[in-house]
Amino acid sequence: MKLIKLAAIAACVLSASVFANDPIIPVSPETKATTTTLRDKAINDNSAYQILKSLTTEVGARHPGTPGEKAGIEWGIKKLKALGFDKVYTEDVKMNGWVREVEKAEILVPSYQKMVITALGRSKSTPKGGLEADIVHFKNYAALEKAADNSLKGKIAFISNRMERLKNGGGYGPANIARSKGHELAAQKGAEALLIRSIGTDDHRNPHTGATNVAMGYTAVPAVALSNPDADQLVRLMEFGHTPKIRLNIQTKDLGPIVTKNVIGEITGRELPNEVVVIGGHLDSWDLGTGAVDDGAGVAIAMATGAFIKNNVTVNPRRTIRVILWGAEELGLIGARAYAKARQADGTIANHVIGSESDFGAGPVYGLQSSKNVSVNALHVVDTMAAIMGNLGVSRRGGDTSGGPDMIPLAALGVPALNLMQDGTDYFDLHHTPDDTFDKVNPEHMRQNLAVWTVFTYIAAEWPGSFK
Ligand SMILES: [Zn+2]
């Protein structure tokens, strides 16, 4: 009696969690076995590391509108073809370019000292030859908000808060408002320019650049990041009771309309070629370093994953694996927005079964997170992926995710996403600095990424059920 009752309750619970005509489809033993074999081979495969070495050495920085970006796009097309992708193509994306030309800052009072700075994305120029003004210090963005409007006439606003170092990069968001919107607030308060402490966790004399919330044209006032040691220096001068006076010379240029590209490579699905699993990274980088951890690593991991699967299975997986090297991410997800908009317009957005972007450096993956767009009936597939990734140090994590910055526009249109969570403890030491170079990347971590991405991508492309 009791047993029968329990069975009835179990059936009831099951029918409540399973939508009527959407049965749970298991991951087949064959798929699990192939995935395990691929994983164990990928952990010894250096191709992601080698691809990254080529991109950062033979191309270098890839800032939109520069010859480096053009070379990067040509490199992407050539490399995808050489890796054996079935189909390689590009899509044009229109945008407005912006470049830095001069960036110089000096403390004039109380003692002459040079500072290490960089202009933030789309910063306006100072007058030619620079401007001279006293610093007014604010501990954070909220403190500058409290200043009276037009109270900083003839001054430079300086926001000095430091971002927190966290494994998941959680310190970035809260600190970042000073970079993205500080220029507008400084203008509202009447300041001549904005100086911020770099959004970064290092103690080296490297400034961190990065985007502002400006899509075209220029920031409201010249907007500049100081290296952490230089920000400390200004704070100490004020602790000694001085009011530092500085000279700031920023010259930048709006390039007007330019065309960037999304570069795409596909492994064609053997049964469901129109259904696509999206993996990728962004091909553009900031101009200061060579874009190794941001985001050459992601580009290399995604390219290597597609090629590794193609070259290590006897027949292509059921669905198409689409590797997207998005353009102009750093200036506002420009390539990713264009990609999603075009798929919404032509109706092929429905064919995007699941996706993820690698854009958080080159650290090892430790967690697997699924978005709310993944249906309850498909969660067991994500659990299976995590189980097979288990001996690579990956565990299943809760929460929600967009699946990476360039996945945001697709996730907003309902595309399911996974987040292959990387250890980002050191990521913001390098992020957007001249120090973002290949030598910082650990080949063992790149192999681990390849193995983890192979598990996710192969199962997503081979499992016949729907993730939606
Ligand atoms: Zn990035």
Image (spheres, rainbow, N blue to C red):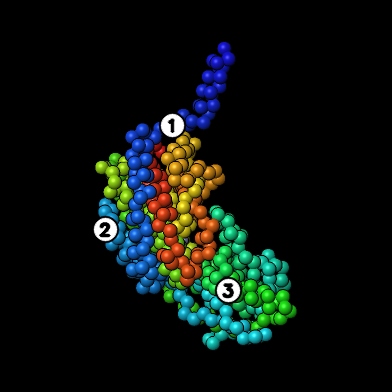
Residue visible at 50% across and 43% down? 395
Q: How many numbered dots are placed on residues in this image?
A: 3
Classify mark 1 as within 8 Å of ligand 1 or not, answering yes or no.
Answer: no
Cα distance in 3D space between marks 1 and 3: 54 Å
Residue identified by numbered label 2: 82
Q: Distance between the residues labelled 1 and 2?
A: 39 Å
How far across and how far down the image is residue 144, in percent? 68, 69
The residue that label 1 is drawn on is 24
Q: Is residue 173 above or below residue 393?
A: below
Could you tell me if residue 69 is visible in this image? no
Residue 313: x, y in percent? Answer: 28, 44
Q: Do the residues labelled 1 and 2 touch (CB within 8 Å)?
A: no
Residue at point 53%, 72% (across, down)? 206
- Would residue 62 be visible to someone looking at this image? yes
Q: What residue type is labelled 2?
A: Ala
Instruction: Name the spot of residue 364 as percent of width and height, x first.
Output: 46, 52
Q: What element carries label 3?
A: strand
* Distance Cα–Cα, label 2 vs label 3: 42 Å
Mark closer to the chain start, 1 or 3:
1
For label 3, the residue is 226
Q: Which of 120 and 166 is in front in this view?
A: 166
Left or right for 95, reference 106? left
In primary-sequence order, the first of circles 1 and 2 is 1
Q: In this rendering, would 53 be left or right of 253?
A: left
Confirm or deny contact between disc 2 and disc 3 (CB under 8 A): no
* Quarter residue 246 falls in: bottom right
